Image (cartoon, rainbow, N blue to C red):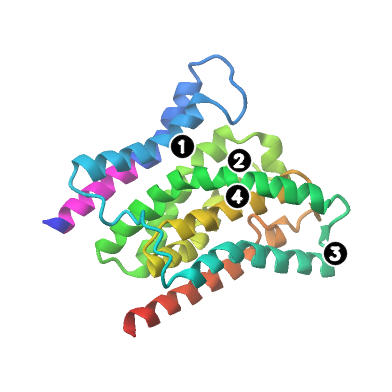
Amino acid sequence: MEISKTARNVIIFSIAALGVGWLGVWLDGRLPAQEEEETLGMAVWLVLPLLVVIVLRTFAGDGWKDAGLHPRFRGNSKWYLWAFIIFPLVTGLTLALGYVTRWIDFTGFDISSYAGVFVSLFFVNIVKNIFEESVWRGYLTVKLVKLGLQDISIYLIAGLIWGFWHAPYYLVFLPEESMYTVLPVDRITFALVAVVSMVIWTVMFTELYRLTGSIWPLILLHAVEDALINHLVIDGYIQISAGMEWVISPISGLIPNLMYLAIGLWLRRERIKAQAG
């Protein structure tokens, strides 16, 4: 009975999460012109999944015990450290490779300017990702684990729902000029590449959550990612050679994604060792 209730609520959440962004798009289409990326529709897209989780936990029998709200610092300090360094480590290795191969041009890089933007974005994204990680790891992932699914199923289901929740953003909300600085492709291709990247990232997000039982390392991990790599590319601190974005872009390139996958699988191995010991 417990499992069927969990499965029902996961289905309700998934349908709602995949639909709210399009509700936001519909709403924006019926309102006067608004400032890009600050529309009422985007607010609906960002906030409603959390509201659905609150309703399911409060009124549909999910409860709050497994929400991962406790920081659980004791015994998890090394995983907090990993949460902070994963994206800087992979990005640093990627940039070093780009420098050696000359696939990345650093002419426009200003360390003081970049560091200032990173710090300001980091603290903003700590707040933003409290809401997001309460949903994707603190609810969807933990419920998929509770259903007893195999690891690969958890990665795929959580990653695809998380990825396709972003679809309205990539297909409608995201300004085209920002999209083209990352990948010079059409919106559908861009969205599909982003979804694949998020499925890959889901392995390390999931395993870090399962190692700690807390959303707070994920909030830290996600905040560093948002502050570190997006504005590095979008704001022109680096220039990637035409055609090499697919390979070495810190946001969606094949090389960094393979490194993220390797880290995720290593975290899985560490979690299995901890469970066995």
Q: Amino acid at mark 2?
A: Arg
Work out how far the residue at label 2 is from the one at label 3, CA to CA, in angstroms.
Answer: 28 Å
Mark 2 or 3, nearer chain start: 3
Residue 21: quadrant of the picture: top left
Taken as a whole, is the magenta stretch helix, strand or loop?
helix
Mark 2 or 4, nearer chain start: 2
- Mark 1 and mark 2 residues within 8 Å of each other at the beta carbon: no
Residue located 76% across and 49% down the image:
114
Task: Find disc 1 in the rendering and name its residue.
Answer: 46
Q: Nearer the viewer, residue 226 or 64?
A: 64
Residue 40 on image: x %, y %: 49, 25
- Give the position of the C terminus as an image quadrant: bottom left
Label 4 neighbourhood size at 10 Å, few (<14), some (14-19), many (20+)?
some
Work out how far the residue at label 2 is from the one at label 4, CA to CA, in angstroms.
Answer: 20 Å
Task: Find disc 2 in the rendering and name its residue.
Answer: 187
Q: Amino acid at mark 4?
A: Asp
Q: How many marks?
A: 4
Residue range (magenta): 3-15
Residue 34 on image: x %, y %: 59, 20
Q: Amino acid at mark 1?
A: Leu
Mark 1 or 4, nearer chain start: 1
In the structure shown, which secondary structural element does the residue marked by tag 4 occupy?
A: helix
- Mark 2 and mark 4 residues within 8 Å of each other at the beta carbon: no
Task: Find disc 3 in the rendering and name its residue.
Answer: 102
Residue 235 on image: x %, y %: 75, 43
Task: Find disc 4 in the rendering and name its residue.
Answer: 226
- In the current view of this chain or complex, which residue is farthest to the top? 32
Work out how far the residue at label 1 is from the one at label 2, CA to CA, in angstroms.
Answer: 20 Å
Residue 274: quadrant of the picture: bottom left
